[in-house]
Image (cartoon, rainbow, N blue to C red):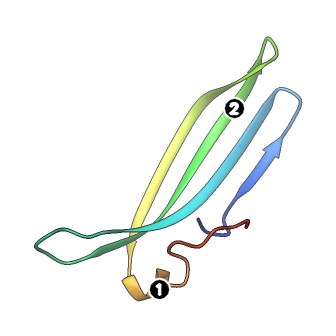
């Protein structure tokens, strides 16, 4: 997880964002490092929160740029 974690909450709607990094390590081939975000749009319907919209996106980064973040927990 990265430090990109946010939530905005209203009475009936909310938005949350989380960020994380990772590596794809094929058996034969070059390691692909990435940084990604997941954003959710929520609505409270009859007292229950439901996901109404989801957007995910990622981009390739240098593997060295995420080494200090890989495996790190935001909270102990």
Mark 2 or 1: in front is 1
Q: Residue furthest top?
A: 46
Relative to residue 69, is residue 26 drawn left or right? left
Relative to residue 44, is residue 61 drawn left or right? left
Give the quarter of the figure containing the N terminus.
bottom right
- Disc 2/disc 1 C-alpha distance (Å): 32 Å
Expressed as whole percent of the image width and height from the top left, the position of residue 43 reads 73, 26
Q: Which mark is residue 24?
A: none
Element on which disc 2 rests: strand
Element on which disc 1 rests: helix
Relative to residue 60, is residue 10 drawn left or right? right
Name the residue beneath numbered marker 1. 65
Crowding at mark 1 (Cα within 10 Å: few <14, some 14-19, many 20+): few
In this rendering, the count of numbered labels is 2
Q: Earlier in the sequence, mark 2 or mark 1?
A: 2
Which residue does the image show at 62% across and 41% down from the upper left?
Answer: 40
Q: Residue furthest bottom?
A: 64
Relative to residue 24, is residue 62 drawn left or right? right
Residue 9: image quadrant is top right
Give the quarter of the figure containing the C terminus.
bottom right
Residue contact between numbered discs 2 and 1, judged by CB atoms under 8 Å? no
Which residue does the image show at 65% across and 52% down from the upper left?
Answer: 17
Expressed as whole percent of the image width and height from the top left, the position of residue 49 reads 73, 25
Which residue does the image show at 25% across and 76% down from the upper left?
Answer: 31
| Image height of 70 relative to 43, above or below | below
Residue 52: image quadrant is top right
Name the residue beneath numbered marker 2. 42
Residue 13: image quadrant is top right
Crowding at mark 2 (Cα within 10 Å: few <14, some 14-19, many 20+): many
């Amino acid at each position: 997880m990265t430090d990109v974690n946010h939530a905005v909450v209203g009475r009936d709607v909310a938005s949350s964002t989380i960020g994380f990094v990772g590596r794809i390590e094929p058996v034969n081939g070059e390691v692909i490092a990435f940084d990604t975000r997941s954003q959710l749009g929520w609505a409270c319907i009859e007292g229950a929160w439901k996901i109404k919209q989801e957007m995910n996106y990622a981009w390739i980064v240098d593997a060295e740029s995420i080494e200090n973040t890989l495996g790190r927990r935001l909270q102990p």
